[in-house]
Image: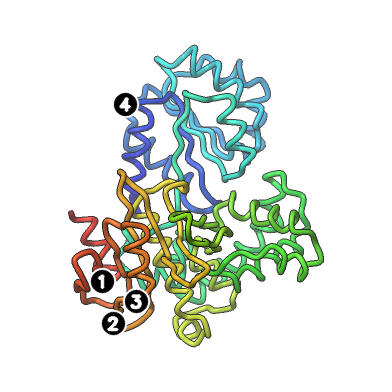
Amino acid sequence: MIRNQFLSTIKSQFRVHPICAILGPRQCGKTTLARQFSEENKKAFSHVHWYDLEDPKDLVRLDQPMLSLESLEGLIIIDEIQRRPDLFPILRVLADRNADRQQYLILGSASKTLLQQSSESLAGRIGYIELTPFSASEIDDIQRLWVRGGFPRSFLSTSDEDSYIWRTNYIRTFLELDLPSLGFSIPAQQLYRFWMMLTHYHGQLFNASDLGRSLGVSDHTVRKYLDILESTFMIRALQPWFANIQKRHVKTPKIYFRDSGILHALLDLPNRTTIERYSRLGALWEGFALEEILRFSQVYPQQAFFWRTHAGAELDLLIKQENKLIGFDFKYVDAPKITSSMRSAIEDLELDRLHIIYPGEVDYPLSSTIHVYGLNNYLNQAKSG
């Protein structure tokens, strides 16, 4: 699958920066995207040089990185950059010295350490791209995407059974190998227990105290665990929006699993039939729809919120973009209707628009500012217009 939107974004970053970083979870397609970019743009570069830092031979080639890299010309791709954080200061020097004949495309599994090191050494020289697994705007089968999630090998598997096997293996590898390689030294079984507990908080407010008591650890440790899963793009902690200081607002984040397939695997829901029998089916779909809207809207984390008051009024998603406030409510029902929470959101937040997203196929207005859209219809309409 050619991911044209991301290929175009890489080009845009290179027009501004000598270094472009593609960050995202393991197995989301970073290496494939880099190969597609180098192949599509091979005429624009005199040479393409590739370093895979999981390959011992390439690690040896970079024993003396300044000597190895300084004389190269063209596009230089460094995969799994988090394995050699000492390269960032060297890339800063080379980016300043050789910007006219070198461009660096660096790939890495996300971590706060990686982000901090690169931002400190490469400020003003690097552009970031978050590569997600496949999204609904890239594929035609939204139901399969919901069941299997967007990781390429999961989504493209020949059957739901093979997809489920891949995801269960991915979870184990992520805990036992990937996290230690990123510098996290938490026992895999402990983090797995925490991850499993979070499945029951999907679409709910995060409660560090309750989780800490269940695990026998402090609130601080629980937040550390959440931070790890968030920084590796497994979990989204959606922050609350504060408005109208005369009302009491919820101040803790809501938790969502970013990939529906990983969530289904953790819950032992291997196919559509088992998913439809799950007691919190609505929450599963609503989290999937919320993530798809966020990916399609291409907003930064600091532009996306939820809103809830202690009086009970709430809005699932609030996006602040181009000085406009757009609200989203996600309903797993046949025919959504206006609720008192929606009226409160319109009044208190002064929303420009409120979209109700549901799994149906018929779109219809409820008022001048509130419109109901099927998820697939909304994405296709926005895509075409």
Q: Secondary structure at mark 1?
A: strand
The answer to whether residue 138 is seen in the rendering is no
Please state the horizontal and vertical placement of residue 226, each as a whole percent of the image.
65, 56
> What number of labels is visible?
4
Residue at 21% of width from left, 76% of height from top?
Answer: 362
- Residue for badge 1: 372
Mark closer to the observer (2, 3): 3
Work out how far the residue at label 3 is from the one at label 1, CA to CA, in angstroms. 13 Å
- Residue for badge 3: 339
Mark closer to the observer (3, 1): 3
Work out how far the residue at label 3 is from the one at label 4, CA to CA, in angstroms. 55 Å
Disc sitting over residue 126 in the figure: none
- Residue for badge 2: 335
The answer to whether residue 346 is seen in the rendering is yes
Q: Which one is earlier in the sequence, the residue at label 1 or at label 4?
A: 4
Q: Which residue type does callout 1 highlight? A: Val
Please state the horizontal and vertical placement of residue 259, each as a whole percent of the image.
49, 63
Work out how far the residue at label 2 is from the one at label 3, CA to CA, in angstroms. 12 Å
Please state the horizontal and vertical placement of residue 239, each as a whole percent of the image.
52, 55
Q: Quadrant of residue 250?
A: bottom right
Q: Which residue type does callout 3 highlight? A: Thr
Q: Which one is earlier in the sequence, the residue at label 4 or at label 2?
A: 4
Q: Which residue type does callout 4 highlight? A: Ala
Please state which of residues 216 and 314 is positioned toward the viewer in this rendering.
Answer: 314
Outermost residue, front side = 246
Q: Which one is earlier in the sequence, the residue at label 1 or at label 2?
A: 2
Outermost residue, top side = 97
- Residue for badge 4: 44
Please state which of residues 343 and 265 is positioned toward the viewer in this rendering.
Answer: 343
Are dots 1 and 4 in contact, CB under 8 Å?
Answer: no
Are dots 1 and 2 in contact, CB under 8 Å?
Answer: yes
Q: Which residue type does callout 2 highlight? A: Ala
